[in-house]
Image (cartoon, rainbow, N blue to C red):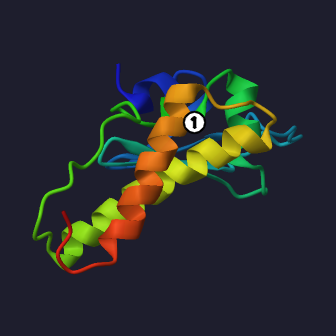
Amino acid sequence: MSAADKFLAKLSRAMKTGEGQWRAVCPGHSSSGRSLTLSVRDVDGRLLVHCFAGCEVTDILAAVGLQFSDLYDAPLGHHFEPTSGLRASERLALLEHESLVVLLVLADIRKDQPPAPETLDRLMLAVSRISRARFSSYG
């Protein structure tokens, strides 16, 4: 089951608005009109979630019983393998991915959930890759 299928199944009145795009009632807040304030977009197996009423993604996920990792088709361990001679566009993609790993770990820490040892190991790998990505001969 894809991340989109899993997430959309938890939402009320989810409507497809385009290719890989949906609107739904946001479960993160009460709305008397039950308007479609939640936007969901699938970008390469990663869900982007935005509530136009201002709900935080963590609140939306908590309301439907999911975690950040449920917004991705591939597990967090699915990452770029460093190779020498990355092009600038590849380096930017790597930076985006590794920065996201850091943000996900920080989100758990912010919720007072201590990260597991393997999560801390992955965080250290992300920090190392971000640091090395600024050099022209990555490897």
Residue 103 percent location from the top left of the image: 59, 52
Q: Nearer the viewer, residue 53 or 1?
A: 1
> Looking at the image, which residue is at 75% across and 28% down?
63
Task: State the residue position of label 1.
Answer: 68
Asked whether residue 96 is in view, the answer is yes
Would residue 136 appear left or right of 6 to someone viewing this image? left
Residue drawn at (48%, 37%), measured in percent from left and top? 121
Residue positioned 41% across, 68% down in the render: 131
Q: Is residue 133 above or below residue 4?
A: below
Element type at mark 1: helix
Quadrant of residue 72 within the rendered picture: top left
**Rendered location of residue 116, percent (x, y):** 60, 26
Q: Residue at x 41, y 48 (%)?
A: 125
Q: Is residue 77 left or right of residue 35?
A: left
Q: Is residue 45 above or below residue 130?
A: above
Categorize mark 1 by other alpha carbons within 10 Å: few (<14), some (14-19), many (20+). Answer: some
Q: Is residue 50 above or below residue 132?
A: above
Q: How many marks?
A: 1
Residue 66, position in %: x, y? 62, 25
Kind of residue sitting beneath label 1: Phe
Left/right of residue 86 with respect to residue 8 in the rendered view: left
Q: Is residue 120 left or right of residue 47?
A: right
